[in-house]
Amino acid sequence: MPLHGTYEPSTDARVREQVELYERTEGAEGATMRGMPVVVLTCVGARSGNVRKVPLMRVEHDGEYAVVASLGGAPAHPTWYHNLVAHPHVELRDGAHVGDYLARELEGDERDLWWSRSVDAFPDYADYAVATDRVIPVFVLEPFGPGAAPDGVDAAGTVGGDGNDVQVSEDDGDEIESFWQAARGRAGLGKIEVVGGVTVAAGVAPPAWAFGDDPRMADALLGLVLSGTKTATSSARWEYDDEVPLPAVGDLSIVLDGSGHPRALVRVTEVAVVPFDEVTEEFAAAEGEGDRTLESWRKDHEGFFRRALDTVGEPFTTDMPVVTERLELLYPRSAG
């Protein structure tokens, strides 16, 4: 699934020329830096939305790759780090092979493992770590393709009332409860909160759901929320009924990733029901998807709503009612 956007070559001539040579020869030329093999990472700019490409050291294990945001030990993260946080769907070229991947920033033991592999592949990383005060970020790139779900996710499984293909197991329920206990304290919530219009004990976790209707979309849209790019969402009015009430201001939700793991706590700050063709340019930009234009929003959401409405037996029309929500990210705090 190719990334969409205008390709913006690097302003660095060395980077620009190496990428062009590597792609033109499918890695037969331009495939090394300092005698070590490289891959070409393609990502989407966090602010511009343009497609960017950069050669990075090749760190591969069992079909997964790591990319290390070292910038030669500089004090700040490279620009592409922020791109991956905002848009975790990336493409990677390794020689003649090009694939789609989801980028996930690592922590703890998992980061230590991939850091060790990275240093084995390119020993200079160890020197870069000494040269900077920051902890150098490491991402793992996990492959996916059309119709494929991340490990452990049954594409027939659903969670919540959104119709998205994200499965939650009993163990995931325990994980959600643990996440809620950590998130509510760090978000500054009191012992008693209003959730879904009902006063409940803070020990009761709010509803958990994932964005979109497949695991890839769930991960991509979650990444936009975590980066502060996505501050709104929308759904078809017909998806709600007596059993699934409309969202209300103050509602809390736990947002899951494509594998069903809790990643964010959000609160609804504004709700409105408007016709599809009256959604504004400003709201489309707040959803943070695609190129953030109203034209892009209408095209992408028409397809999404058609799929969603098939399940409830309602037709898509350009004047159908749409539920628009503004969201506040409570935990973790946005990196932006």
Image (tube, helix red, strand yellow):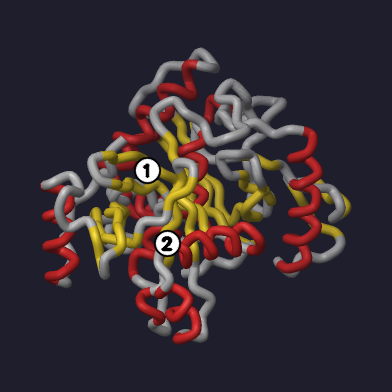
The outermost residue toward the top is 313
Which quadrant holds residue 47? bottom left
Q: Does residue 234 appear in the picture of this structure?
A: no
Residue drawn at (75%, 46%) of the image = 176
In space, the residues marked 2 and 1 are separated at their CA atoms by 50 Å
Q: Is residue 149 left or right of residue 174?
A: left
Q: Determine which residue is flagged by label 2.
A: 121
Discs 2/1, front: 2
Q: Determine which residue is flagged by label 1.
A: 279
Q: Looking at the rendering, in which quadrant would you find the N terminus?
A: top left
Helix, strand, or loop for circle 1? loop
Amino acid type, callout 2: Ala
17 is higher (above) or lower (below) than 163 = below
Looking at the picture, tell me which residue is in the foreground, 58 or 196: 58
Amino acid type, callout 1: Val
Which quadrant holds residue 16? bottom left
Residue drawn at (45%, 41%) of the image = 63
Q: Residues within 10 Å of mark 2 (few under 14, many from 20)?
A: some
Q: Is residue 325 left or right of residue 45?
A: right
Q: Position of residue 251 (x, y in %)?
A: 68, 49
Residue drawn at (33%, 39%) of the image = 99
Q: Position of residue 114 (x, y in %)?
A: 54, 59
Q: Is residue 52 left or right of residue 132?
A: left
Looking at the picture, tell me which residue is in the foreground, 206 or 115: 115
Residue drawn at (12%, 62%) of the image = 17
Q: Is residue 141 left or right of residue 328?
A: left
- N-term mark: 2 or 1: 2
